[in-house]
Amino acid sequence: MPEPNPAHPTPGAPDAPSIALPAGAALPPGLVLRRPTPDDHGPVTAVIADWWGLPPTTHLPLLLPRLFFQHFADTSFLGEDDAGLAAFLIGFHSSSRPEVAYIHFVGVRPDLRTSGLARTLYGAFFDEARAAGCTRVEAITGPGNRRSQAFHRAMGFELTGDTEIDGVRAWRDYDGPGEHRVAFTRTI
Ligand SMILES: CC(C)(COP(=O)(O)OP(=O)(O)OC[C@H]1O[C@@H](n2cnc3c(N)ncnc32)[C@H](O)[C@@H]1OP(=O)(O)O)[C@@H](O)C(=O)NCCC(=O)NCCS
């Protein structure tokens, strides 16, 4: 059994970075935020189809492999309450573009929506990214995810693309043939 390495605290363990809420923000009653661990990979990917309103056969969970829970836990959040998993934000600070922080996935349980929870998670992520020297946050979604586009617009992101797809500005073939994406960017 290897000795614990203090330079690499176990994500989710008591020595993982604590999570500070943005000034003036509050969590829903009973909701506790923590860092995700690799054990959260199964429970998180299990709710994606339901939370995103997609058929159970969706391949979307494959875009969130276990590696994110192993290697990006210290820049991610997971919320739980008495009913179980309540919300998650999986993000990281870019190693090739140190000025950029990237939000890969965010989800809020349907019964907790529109009460500012995702705004609070984003605010906490922005604060940590700023403290780490980042000046910009980026994310992407598909042209069909109008809810994500509305949410990111409300969060102050600019939507970019090189063409119009289904009435939305998007980058054609961004992630391969037919895999068009809307890109979000904002300064922090
Ligand atoms: C998108 C999602 C994370 C938003 O979570 P939420 O906790 O309901 O969002 P908040 O209550 O913090 O809303 C923040 C802002 O976005 C706006 N917003 C949120 N959902 C919106 C929607 N469906 N349509 C329009 N605006 C929306 C809110 O009005 C709010 O703006 P305001 O503060 O100016 O009033 C949530 O709907 C979700 O989990 N959706 C399914 C997963 C998904 O699509 N994730 C994003 C792509 S990875």
Image (cartoon, grey):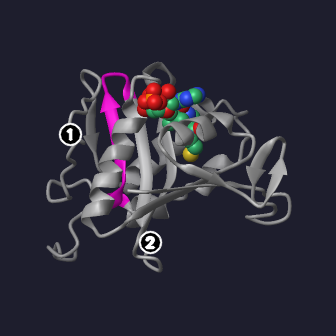
* Left or right: 100 in relation to 34: right
Which residue position is annotated with label 2?
Answer: 94
Image location of residue 76, percent across then percent down: 36, 53
Q: Are the residues tagged 2 and 1 within 8 Å (C-beta)?
A: no
Looking at the image, can residue 86 be seen? no
Is disc 1 surrounded by few (<14), some (14 to 19) or many (20+) residues within 10 Å? few
Closer mark to the observer between disc 2 and disc 1: 1
**Apparent side of residue 99 relative to residue 82 in the rendered image (left or right):** right
Q: Which residue is mark 1?
A: 23
Q: Residue at x 71, y 55 (%)?
A: 181
The relative height of residue 20 versus residue 54 in the rendered view (above or below) is below
Query: In percent of the image, x 24 and y 23: which residue is there?
Result: 30
Q: What is the C-alpha distance between the residues marked 2 and 1?
A: 25 Å
Nearest the camera: 182 or 58?
Answer: 182
| Three-letter amino acid code of the residue under disc 1 | Ala
Q: Is residue 100 visible?
A: yes
Along the line of sight, which residue is nearer the eye, 109 or 21?
21
Residue 147 marker = none
Query: Eyeballing the image, is 12 above or below 9?
Result: above
Dot 2, how many residues are within 10 Å of its Cα: few (below 14), some (14-19), or many (20+)? some
The magenta segment: 73-84
